[in-house]
Image (tube, grey):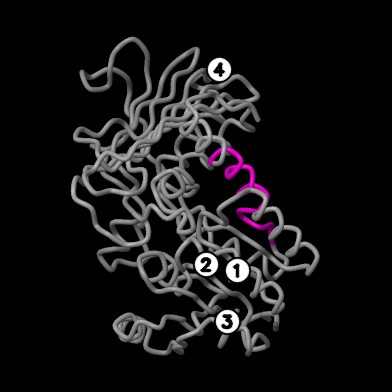
Amino acid sequence: MTTGTTGTPLRVGLIGYGLAGSVFHAPLISATDGLALDTVVTANPERQRQARAEHPDVRLAADPDELFDRADGLDLIVIASPNKTHVPLATAALKAGLPVVVDKPLAGTAAEARELAALAEQRGLLLSVFQNRRWDNDFLTLRGLLAEGVLGEVQRFESRFERWRPQLKGGWRESGDPAEIGGLLYDLGSHLVDQALVLFGPATRVYAESDVRRTAAEADDDTFIAITHAGGVHSHLYASATAAQLGPRFRVLGSRAGYVKYGLDPQEAALREGRRPGPGWGTEPESLWGRIGSGESPLTGGGTPVPTRPGDYPAYYAAVADALTGAGPNPVGALAAADALDVLEAARRSARDGVAVTL
């Protein structure tokens, strides 16, 4: 591995060019000062053509070993391949002497995540987890409100990633094979749990309900997780592909006021449409702002609009670049991901056995 110097971008090898690789990682890497997308690994000819069309200067490789064999020519590996490959590829990259970013979930179990964290520490290498939803516009806004104390003592936190997708899309994310680490619990649940732990601290008790609703579906597509935090806050988290009516993204109830926010951060939609970070990135119209107040529903005019802060996915890779050059900390450490996996594993046990799990 070589280290970047002033004016010399750090060279990034990206493994995987499906949704995560092509829509999120490649555009955000390319938009980050100090990083350069050097190589994309995909064996799919159509995706190779797509990568070359979208990033004309990129090298192409069909196998991750091609990256590890020339580790001295790279400064960072980003793993955006299917979930079941995350641990073996991250292990191989670290053993090759390369820092690693891994898309969520880092691993299938907390134990695996902690083993990876130990390996990275032993090798003195960065291991970071792409929890981009920490830079959603609504999440940044809520963190600001909590810091200001305007809600008082938070008692209940409701958070939803709900969709209406009655038809299956197919692919490994909907596979019932446990080895694939599919289903919404580990997909959207990874974001929901991570956000709750960042906001309100460690979990002490977990209860969950996880169902397979759609005909011919194999993996959970409708999941609820209740977390009791050490500080006393109760988090109620919803991940569903079968919600015919979507609830609020956030509903946060405090001793002084509540905050309710509908709609999704606009950055994923913008990236899917081919837009790239620039002026006005991550902003939304005033009509989508959340409301803060007490005593009346925002749907009937209650509360006061709260300007939504701009979402900032580019901040993640900017922080990674700083961490690699010693200018800042790891934006999302592996041990934080392990804590979230503790909760996800407890949720899976709870849903299976119909009991609450104490951590």
Q: CA distance from mark 3 to mark 1?
A: 22 Å
| Residue found 54% across the figure and 81% down from its top | 64
Q: Magenta stretch: give its range.
A: 328-344
Q: CA distance from mark 2 to mark 1?
A: 6 Å
Of the numbered discs 3 and 2, the one sitting upstream in the chain is 3
Q: Are marks 3 and 1 in contact (CB under 8 Å)?
A: no
Q: Are marks 2 and 1 in contact (CB under 8 Å)?
A: yes
Let me know if residue 334 is in the magenta part: yes
Helix, strand or loop at mark 1: helix
Pointer 2 residue: 85
Q: CA distance from mark 1 to mark 4?
A: 43 Å
Q: Nearer the viewer, residue 134 or 47?
A: 47
The spot of residue 234 in percent (x, y) is 52, 22
Pointer 1 residue: 88
The spot of residue 166 in percent (x, y) is 19, 45
Q: Main secondary structure of the magenta part?
A: helix
